[in-house]
Image (cartoon, rainbow, N blue to C red):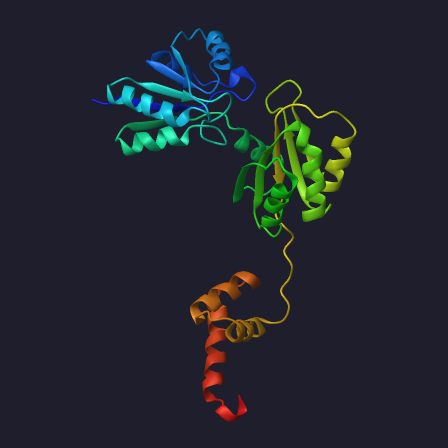
């Protein structure tokens, strides 16, 4: 019988955030696959966990995944951890999980800390929907391309950034998103010098320019301010009917979203428009 892979979340800073279940699982499994074995050994030593460690990181995950799957198929139980937080979230892990699914091996989540979720929960930005971007590209043009892509985003966007690139990132945000765009920046979450900045991009650039930035960063970008559409619902229906090849169902859906009105009301307006259009002689159209 195959073993089981446990995907175990570990603290992002404060060691007290380790769950009872996570400690028990790490004690009970045959092997722990860790992003950095030296870093993880300090955590395990803190909890008196003596389970063997093996490295699993972005540079060896393809080859290592096959080795770990073979051990799982032989009946061993394994745990996957990253340096901090939940494995697979902007960290190595998904390739091993995917191979386990392909091999019919059980994968179990042992949930816990995540910088992404922790930052969202205290940001004060909308959390009903959000978009996670991961780490922003290190080069300016590639970073600007990503920022341009989210310029009109209607949900909160979350990304990770490094201390030495934060100011360049904020400068690009001022250029692409505007200095008034709302942001939150969480620094050193759960650690001694934890900090949360909340304000606009211009204010963030000014604040962080006055000091040396250190620690892990989560940058949260608020939704773009929604512009009120021009004209009436009827005008929008006519425009889309004339300028696009969308069918009436798609037109109604798009207009309802654009004007934030009930689809049934837009549908009734479209019916009236279509009735009027069919009753108008060709010579008057």
Q: Nearer the viewer, residue 133 or 110?
A: 133
Whether 45 is drawn above or below 183: the answer is: above
Relative to residue 167, is residue 238 drawn left or right? left
Split into 4 quadrants, where in the image is the N terminus? top left
Relative to residue 52, is residue 136 drawn left or right? right
Residue 67 percent coordinates (x, y): 32, 21
Quarter-wise, where is residue 102 in the image? top left
* Total numbered circles: 0
Residue 133 percent coordinates (x, y): 54, 39
Whether 187 is drawn above or below 74: the answer is: below
Residue 194 percent coordinates (x, y): 65, 23
Residue 260 at least partly seen: no
What residue lies at 48% left-to-right and 68% top-to-bottom?
Answer: 251
What residue lies at 24% left-to-right and 19% top-to-bottom?
Answer: 74
Residue 273 at least partly seen: yes
Whether 250 is drawn above or below 74: the answer is: below
Q: Residue at the far left: name it.
A: 1
Q: Nearer the viewer, residue 119 or 106?
A: 106
Residue 208 percent coordinates (x, y): 74, 31
What residue lies at 37% left-to-right and 28% top-to-bottom?
Answer: 96
Whether 15 is drawn above or below 63: the answer is: above
């Amino acid at each position: 019988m195959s073993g089981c892979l446990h995907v175990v979340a570990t603290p992002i800073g404060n060691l007290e955030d380790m769950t009872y279940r996570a400690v028990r699982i790490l004690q009970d499994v045959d092997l722990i696959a860790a992003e950095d074995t030296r870093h993880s050994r300090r955590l395990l030593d803190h909890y008196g966990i003596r389970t063997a460690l093996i490295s699993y990181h972005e540079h060896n995950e393809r080859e290592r995944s096959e080795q770990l799957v073979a051990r799982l198929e032989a009946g061993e139980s394994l745990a996957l951890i990253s340096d901090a937080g939940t494995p697979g979230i902007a960290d190595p892990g998904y390739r091993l999980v995917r191979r386990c699914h392909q091999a019919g091996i059980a994968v179990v989540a042992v949930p816990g800390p995540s910088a992404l979720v922790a930052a969202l929960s205290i940001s004060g930005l909308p959390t009903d929907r959000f978009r996670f971007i991961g780490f922003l590209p290190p080069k300016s043009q590639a970073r600007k391309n990503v920022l341009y892509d989210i310029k009109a985003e209607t949900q909160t966007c979350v990304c990770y950034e490094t201390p030495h690139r934060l100011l360049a990132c904020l400068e690009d945000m001022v250029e692409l998103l505007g200095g008034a765009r709302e942001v939150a920046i969480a620094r050193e979450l759960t650690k001694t010098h934890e900090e949360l900045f909340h304000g606009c991009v211009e204010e963030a650039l000014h604040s962080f320019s006055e000091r040396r930035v250190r620690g892990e960063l989560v940058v949260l970008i608020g939704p773009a301010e929604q512009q009120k559409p021009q004209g009436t619902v009827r005008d929008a229906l006519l425009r889309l009917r004339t300028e696009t090849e969308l069918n009436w169902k798609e037109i109604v859906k798009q207009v309802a979203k654009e004007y934030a009105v009930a689809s049934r009301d837009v549908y009734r307006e479209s019916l009236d428009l279509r009735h009027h259009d069919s009753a108008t002689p060709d010579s008057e159209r």
